[in-house]
Amino acid sequence: IFDAPLGWSQQEAFTELCKLEKRVPEHYWVVYQNVCRFDEEAGVAGSRLATNSRSAIDAAKTTVAYTASLIAMWRRL
């Protein structure tokens, strides 16, 4: 059985990420990507949306949950 080269699946994943990024509001996508893809702490990522640390953590959690739910809905998961 022939398997696609690793580079092809990586390109497909990158293409899918780009499509999703265009559909999500920019500020939400940045927080979502920083937390989920680049493993940034929620308080740091959320500081772009709120001024104090507790609100920043809550903002990041809400933003990640919202963005993940949009992606799940679009992908019919």
Image: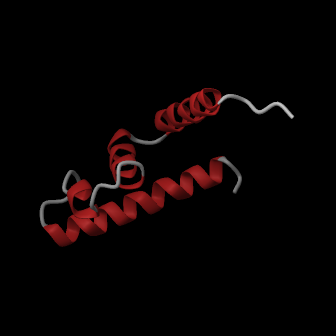
Looking at the image, how many numbered discs can be counted on the residues? Answer: 0
Residue projecting furthest to the left: 52
Image coords of residue 47 (percent x, y): 19, 56
In the rendered view, does 63 fall on the left or right side of 14?
Answer: left
Image coords of residue 60 (percent x, y): 32, 61
- Applied colour scheme: secondary structure
Say if 15 sits above or below 74 in the image. Answer: above
Measuring 48% from the left and 33% from the top, which residue is drawn there? 22
Residue projecting furthest to the right: 1
Residue projecting furthest to the bottom: 54
> Of residues 56 and 1, which is closer to you in this image?
1
In the rendered view, does 56 fall on the left or right side of 9?
Answer: left
Measuring 26% from the left and 67% from the top, which residue is drawn there? 57
Say if 63 sits above or below 22 in the image. Answer: below
In the rendered view, does 36 fall on the left or right side of 56?
Answer: right
- The C terminus - image quarter: bottom right
Say if 21 sits above or below 70 in the image. Answer: above
Measuring 57% from the left and 50% from the top, which residue is drawn there? 71
> Of residues 1 and 38, which is closer to you in this image?
1
Say if 8 sits above or below 35 in the image. Answer: above
Image coords of residue 56 (percent x, y): 22, 63
- The N terminus - image quarter: top right
Image coords of residue 48 (percent x, y): 21, 51
